[in-house]
């Protein structure tokens, strides 16, 4: 009997520990302060006798903000056909297409090995069934913290890709300018040669 009680209490303690450590459970957060003042969207005041600076945002607004940042970065990197934007990816593709011109020393064929990888296009698991009002529905569900964490990671990846593509675009454009200058110099030298040949007296 004593052994059974020990097992029961042990199981109960594990269950309580799991509940208390659940990162997705909404916790009460004390935000009221005394002697409050606003500074650049943050609140300065006294809380539990201590001076603190507090920033309080609605989670729906925070999620909207991070998602909008990610979508803007994604469009800047890969473009948006609906809005007529090429993005850095499209600019780089056009630039590399210029370099394929035979006059520019190219082969006439575009070598493009970088696929578009839109992170937000990944499909989420969907539940299909009947809701409380007997409607046939499809539902996706995700923990709020997981969604924010996922989009923060998307932002980190897109900031890195933005920097990488911008560097590739700059390098490609510099290559195009160099090759165009070489062509102009070759054309100029060719014209000078023709002019010199034309000015030579004809041999009899």
Image (cartoon, rainbow, N blue to C red):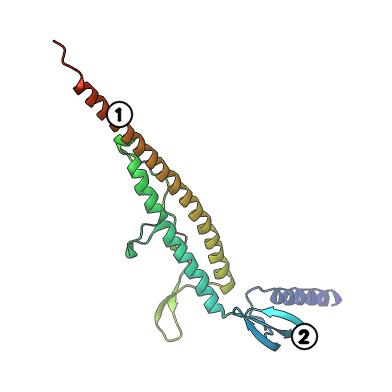
Residue at x 15% of width, y 15% of height: 202
| Residue at 20% across, 22% down | 199
Q: Earlier in the sequence, mark 1 or mark 2?
A: 2
The residue under the point 36% across, 46% down is 95
- Toward the top, the furthest residue is 204
Q: Quadrant of residue 11 in the image?
A: bottom right
> In which image quadrant can residue 17 be found?
bottom right
Q: In the drawing, does residue 40 fall left or right of residue 139?
A: right
Q: In screen coordinates, is 57 left or right of 88?
A: right
Mark 1 = which residue? Answer: 189
Q: Residue under circle 2?
A: 48
Q: Is residue 120 above or below residue 33?
A: above
Residue 74 image position (x, y, % from top left)? 45, 61
Mark yes or no: residue 166 visible. Answer: yes
Q: Nearer the viewer, residue 92 or 187?
A: 187
Bin the neighbour count of mark 1 within 10 Å (Cα to Cα): few under 14, some 14-19, many 20 and up: few
Q: Is residue 105 visible?
A: no
Residue closest to the eye, 110 or 1: 110
Q: Secondary structure at mark 1?
A: helix
**Labels 1, 2: front one:** 1
Instruction: Kindly identify the residue that appears in the image at 34 percent across and 65 percent down.
Output: 83
What number is the disc on residue 38?
none
């Amino acid at each position: 009997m004593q052994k059974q009680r020990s097992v029961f209490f042990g199981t109960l303690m594990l269950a309580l520990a799991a509940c208390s450590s659940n990162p997705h459970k909404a916790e009460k957060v004390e935000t009221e302060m005394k002697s409050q003042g606003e500074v650049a969207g943050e609140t300065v005041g006294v809380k539990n006798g201590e001076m603190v600076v507090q920033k309080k945002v609605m989670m729906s607004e925070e999620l909207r903000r991070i998602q909008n940042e990610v979508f803007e970065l994604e469009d800047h990197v890969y473009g948006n056909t609906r809005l007529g934007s090429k993005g850095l990816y499209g600019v780089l593709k056009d630039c590399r297409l210029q370099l394929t011109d035979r006059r520019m020393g190219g082969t006439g064929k575009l070598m493009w090995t970088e696929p578009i990888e839109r992170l937000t296009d990944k499909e989420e698991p969907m539940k299909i069934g009947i809701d409380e009002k007997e409607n046939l529905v499809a539902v996706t569900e995700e923990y709020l913290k997981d969604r924010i964490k996922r989009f923060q990671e998307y932002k980190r990846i897109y900031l890195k890709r933005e920097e990488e593509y911008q560097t590739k675009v700059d390098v490609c454009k510099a290559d195009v300018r160099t090759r165009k200058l070489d062509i102009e110099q070759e054309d100029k030298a060719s014209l000078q040669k023709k002019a010199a040949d034309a000015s030579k007296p004809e041999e009899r």
